[in-house]
Amino acid sequence: MAFPYLCQKKMKHLNLMLALLCAVPLAAQTGDFKGSLKLPQGELPLVFHFDQMTGVPAATMDSPAQGAFDIPIDLLRFFKDSVTLEVRKIQMHYEGHFLNDSVIEGTFSQGGASLPLTLRRTSRDTASFRPGTPQPPFPYREEEVTIKAKDGVALAGTLTLPATEGPHPAVLLISGSGPSDRDEKALNYRPFFMIADYLTRQGFAVLRMDDRGVGKSGGTYKATTLQSAAADAECALDYLLRRKDIRLSQTGLAGHSLGGTIAFHLAAARPRDVAFVVSLAGMAVPGRQLMSTQCEALILRKLTPARQDALRKDYARFYDLMAEALPLDTIRARSLPLSLRLWKQTGDFPQLFSPDVSEEARRSEARLILQHTVTPEIVSLIRHDPSEDLRQTRCPVWAANGEKDTQVSARENLAAVRKCAEEGGNRRVTTRLYAGLNHLFIPARTGDPSEYWTLKGNFSPQVLRDMAAWMRQVLGLPENPEARQ
């Protein structure tokens, strides 16, 4: 979802639950920044690409003059108005602070030498795509659309339509947790563009939207909850249903990560308007349970048994606190001592535990971190139980997970989809487990989010083929010859 499913951002362990967005404005945490080192032999340009992979901060570095591109950043940490970067294999370290959301001023260090390096926001070469990304010209039409949300905020998106005359079957794509643009773009990976392109070639109209505060959409993202994201998605669904070139009885939903959970929510609430649901790594277990499973997979399994036992209890207390029906500020205040204990044990935010930092300063900085860690989205997700929505979903369901998914446990969540749907009397459920794929449906080594920005693959062609074939089958559409290519 975007997920770190609960995410927003933990630096060292990439724990999607206790993650950190920190005080640097969100807009400054994504994008491309360029600067030059002034060396005796001339200038050496460097480009840093900041992004989000399902809510987890990610970065790569280019040194164009040396022919080096997409060098993975091992450490990326935002704290207050500063950023820290490390590439350990070349002993590179950068400490900078944001003058504004477009300029970073700092120091580049390597091999014992240090030089000033100012980075300015720039545009990435748009010709740089992952292998398999479709290129224009496209055999379909594209429309830029604007949809008004229930609170009046203008949401922007793209509607792709087959070149043939309508009305067309249609699908709304729903993004995961964390701020995402209409393509769910991160590090030149554009899964929603891939899905929209393939399905439109298969005869479907496909609508994909920028989240609030992202791309061309208005509003801000920081107050987003699962429920408000679902309300925005419902407005997008209504937009599709009002169009004369859309076949109302053949309009469905496809969501990735948290978007899959939202798709089940809308299908349960609007049974007459949702013809099918596609869940791509959607959460089907209670949010509290998901967090515990993520914690085991992404943090605890990497520790010694003794440390696992100690930390497991503290993480459980933190999750339980977020699950209580308390105001966010109360949760933040009550979790402060526990958070400090966790960070000290895991080695996160070491600057907080420096001997020259007073207890008052330590707690003050911790409060700031918790302001950006305990967010409305995270709390709404941990309090959500999708089981009743699944029981109330009457339309056909196709749920898929990558076998190496460490964010939304594949077997646990696919089993929950089938169990809850069948408890509600829905037998039209198909679940698929794809060997070797991660949460992003990219071939992976381990599935750990820490390797996301090292992977060069693209959205699985097999998943695209299977998803489209199932959608055509449940809607009674003839097979598309292009699907066999």
Image (cartoon, grey):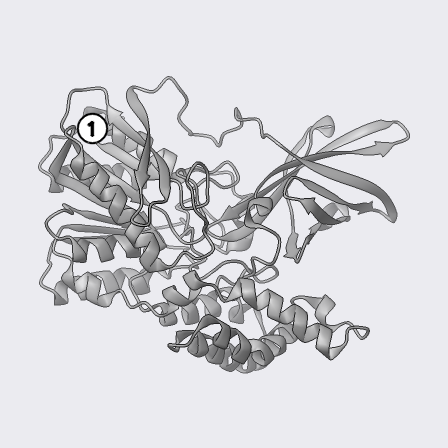
Residue 58 at x, y percent in the picture? 57, 48
Q: Is residue 317 visible?
A: yes
Look at the picture and state if 55 lies above or below 348.
above
Look at the picture and state if 313 lies above or below 172.
below
- Tell me the amino acid under the disc marked 1: Gly
Residue 76 at x, y percent in the picture? 64, 52
152 sits left or right of 431 in the view: right
Residue 228 at x, y percent in the picture? 34, 56
Q: Quadrant of residue 459?
A: top left
Q: Quadrant of the C terminus?
A: top left
The residue lying at 33 percent from left, 45 percent from top is 152
Instruction: Say which of 286 and 142 sits in front.
Output: 142
The residue lying at 34 percent from left, 53 percent from top is 229
Instruction: Say which of 364 and 426 sits in front.
Output: 364
355 sits left or right of 19 in the view: right
The residue lying at 52 percent from left, 53 percent from top is 56
The residue lying at 39 percent from left, 46 percent from top is 441
Label 1: how many residues lie within 10 Å, few (<14), some (14-19) or many (20+)?
Answer: many
Residue that numbered label 1 is attached to = 203
Residue 474 at x, y percent in the picture? 12, 42
Q: Quadrant of residue 404?
A: bottom left
Q: Is residue 402 visible?
A: no
Q: Quadrant of residue 210?
A: top left
In terms of secondary structure, where does tag 1 sit? loop
